[in-house]
Image (cartoon, rainbow, N blue to C red):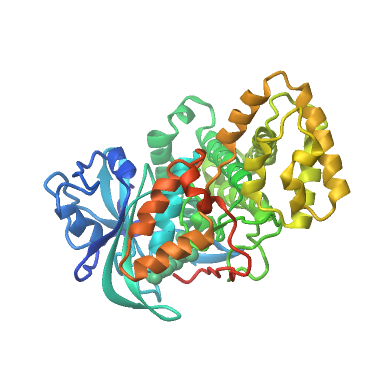
């Protein structure tokens, strides 16, 4: 059920601002199935009114009527600094549909737009759309994207671009920033109302325990610890892990200047605006933990309703300490699986760390390497392993492969079984920036076929798809890295 708190301090009734002559840029039929929208043979909604609704031009289809669109207030920490009130500056929650909230991003100004125009450009909308759906098919929790609707309406960024509206779905768009908002206003009644709503709708098991709000915290923190470990395992860098971009359901949310690693560089920074590297790949777990600390402090007043300040803080602190433990366990489990290891041996983590260091030193392509690793088996000879060529320090990587081959001999599953398990966790296809960029450039010329192609490829990221081999490859040498920043 949609954010069903009401009051001017919480949200504002907000109508989308229409855009001229909307047209479909992208549409996810799998996301549409999630919300039971009947589709025609082209995979688009049967009812043409959906185009107008998802453009923000009207509120009714023949099936649905969105009577109460709102924009919500939230606050948060941006780049580690308290930023005060932010809110849905360009997102409008249309309402509920089949158990999901439907939100339009880029549908015009809201009460919370501050200096912004409430718009999103075609480029950033396509990036959000493609990555939401790719993430879903990788099996990682995420908001979904239903559509991108374009218009020739000009929008000024660094250059003149055109507007688009991305529609997205989630069981709830509540963020850590919503809690920080009421907490910063010292509005404990609102804080409680929001926590109760979240528990009631999404964390019902918290009701049965002695400290429901502590349990709520633990649940949110656990989901986000698992989420960030999953990101690390597929080489996903979010780019803007501000506390207002962290979901209370542990979903990947707010795709902006994100990037999947091509070559492995532990301190890779995907967001061009992040000069200090606060959100670099290797810092993501620590930053998520920091965000959970923000949530912990925001929720403290709810514990203090019936516990002393000291008791509340002690309990919350030890709940927070579960984050690094859950993260480390999940990371180890996921990376062991990437190596095809089922048994848990002490030597596995040093084996992994040595590999990652060598990959970093030689800037080896993260996705291709792990995918190819499934071809190494317990009978492999060093000279048959072509990936050795990607490493600068040949003797060191040869030693590593020897250790790896000895290690997999200890496993009690067959080479074939291990290989197919590895291919189910090491994707062959990830949404590399240069692929998204090419699809965007085509779309800017009104050719949306490349978006469809990518949608198709990334719907089966663990399949071999020999006909799409080129899409699995790292960017061609010499291609300039695409700079993505917060401005979109
Ligand atoms: P982001 O960095 O995209 O998470 O955005 C941070 C804050 O700025 C959020 O409150 C957004 O709603 C707001 N914002 C971003 N872009 C715009 C825009 N074009 N117009 C209005 N608000 C925006
Ligand atoms: Mg945001």
Toward which corner of the image does residue 108 lie, by quadrant?
bottom left
Quarter holding the N terminus is top left
Q: State the residue at coordinates (80%, 39%).
A: 382
The answer to whether residue 108 is above or below residue 312 is below
> Seen from this angle, which residue lies furthest top?
412
Toward which corner of the image does residue 10 lie, by quadrant?
bottom left
Q: State the residue at coordinates (65%, 50%).
A: 366
Q: Is residue 55 visible?
A: yes
From the viewer's perspective, is 271 left or right of 2? right
Figure disc tally: 0
Q: State the residue at coordinates (41%, 35%).
A: 202
The answer to whether residue 212 is above or below residue 180 is above
From the viewer's perspective, is 189 left or right of 299? left
Q: Tell which of 402 and 346 is nearer to you.
A: 402
Residue 462, percent from left and from top: 52, 39
The answer to whether residue 145 is above or below residue 79 is above
Q: State the residue at coordinates (39%, 50%).
A: 455
Q: Is residue 187 visible?
A: no
Q: Tell which of 209 and 459 is nearer to you.
A: 459
From the viewer's perspective, is 137 left or right of 422? left
Residue 125, percent from left and from top: 38, 62
Residue 306, percent from left and from top: 54, 37
Q: Tell which of 452 and 196 is nearer to you.
A: 452
Residue 182, percent from left and from top: 46, 54
Q: Tell which of 485 and 434 is nearer to you.
A: 434
> Seen from this angle, which residue lies furthest front?
383
Quarter holding the C terminus is bottom left
């Amino acid at each position: 059920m949609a954010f069903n708190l009401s009051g001017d301090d919480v949200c504002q009734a907000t109508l989308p601002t229409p855009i001229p002559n909307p047209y479909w840029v992208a549409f996810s039929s799998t996301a549409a199935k999630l919300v039971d929208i009947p589709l025609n043979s082209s995979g688009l909604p049967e009812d043409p009114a959906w185009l107008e609704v998802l453009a923000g031009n009207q509120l009714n289809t023949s099936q649905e009527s969105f009577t109460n669109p709102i924009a919500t207030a939230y606050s948060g920490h941006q780049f580690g600094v308290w930023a005060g009130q932010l809110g849905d500056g360009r997102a409008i929650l249309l309402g509920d549909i089949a158990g999901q909230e439907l939100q339009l991003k880029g549908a015009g100004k809201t009460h919370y737009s501050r200096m912004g125009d409430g718009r999103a450009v075609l480029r950033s909308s396509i990036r959000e759309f493609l990555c939401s759906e790719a993430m879903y098919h990788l099996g990682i929790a995420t908001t979904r994207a239903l559509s991108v609707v374009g218009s020739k309406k000009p929008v000024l960024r660094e250059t003149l671009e055109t507007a688009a509206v991305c529609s997205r779905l989630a069981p709830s768009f509540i963020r850590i920033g919503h809690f920080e908002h009421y907490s910063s206003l010292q509005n404990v009644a609102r804080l409680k109302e929001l926590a109760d709503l979240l528990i009631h709708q999404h964390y019902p098991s918290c009701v049965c325990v002695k400290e429901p709000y502590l349990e709520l915290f633990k649940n949110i923190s656990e989901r986000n610890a698992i989420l960030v470990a999953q990101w690390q395992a597929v080489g996903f860098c979010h780019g803007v892990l501000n506390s207002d971009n962290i979901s209370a359901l542990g979903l990947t949310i707010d795709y902006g200047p994100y990037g999947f690693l091509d070559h492995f560089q532990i301190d890779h920074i995907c967001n061009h605006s992040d000069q200090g590297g606060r959100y670099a790949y290797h810092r993501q777990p620590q930053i998520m933990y920091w965000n959970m600390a923000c949530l912990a402090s925001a929720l403290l007043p709810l514990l203090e309703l019936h516990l002393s300040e000291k008791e509340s803080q002690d309990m919350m602190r030890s709940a927070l300490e579960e984050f690094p433990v859950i993260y480390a366990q999940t990371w180890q489990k996921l990376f062991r699986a990437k190596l095809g290891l089922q048994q848990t041996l002490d030597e596995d983590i040093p084996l992994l760390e040595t590999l990652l260091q060598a990959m970093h030193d030689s800037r080896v392509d993260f996705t291709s390497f792990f995918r190819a690793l499934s071809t190494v088996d317990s009978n492999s000879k060093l000279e048959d392993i072509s990936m050795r060529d990607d490493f600068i320090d040949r003797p060191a990587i040869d030693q590593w492969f020897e250790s790896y081959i000895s290690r997999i001999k200890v496993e009690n599953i067959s080479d074939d079984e291990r290989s197919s398990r590895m291919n189910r966790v090491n994707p062959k296809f990830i949404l590399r920036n240069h692929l998204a960029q090419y699809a965007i450039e085509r779309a800017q010329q009104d050719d949306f076929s490349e978006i469809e192609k990518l949608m198709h490829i990334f719907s089966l990221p663990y399949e071999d798809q020999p006909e799409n081999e080129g899409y699995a490859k790292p960017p061609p040498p010499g291609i300039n890295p695409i700079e993505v920043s917060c401005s979109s």
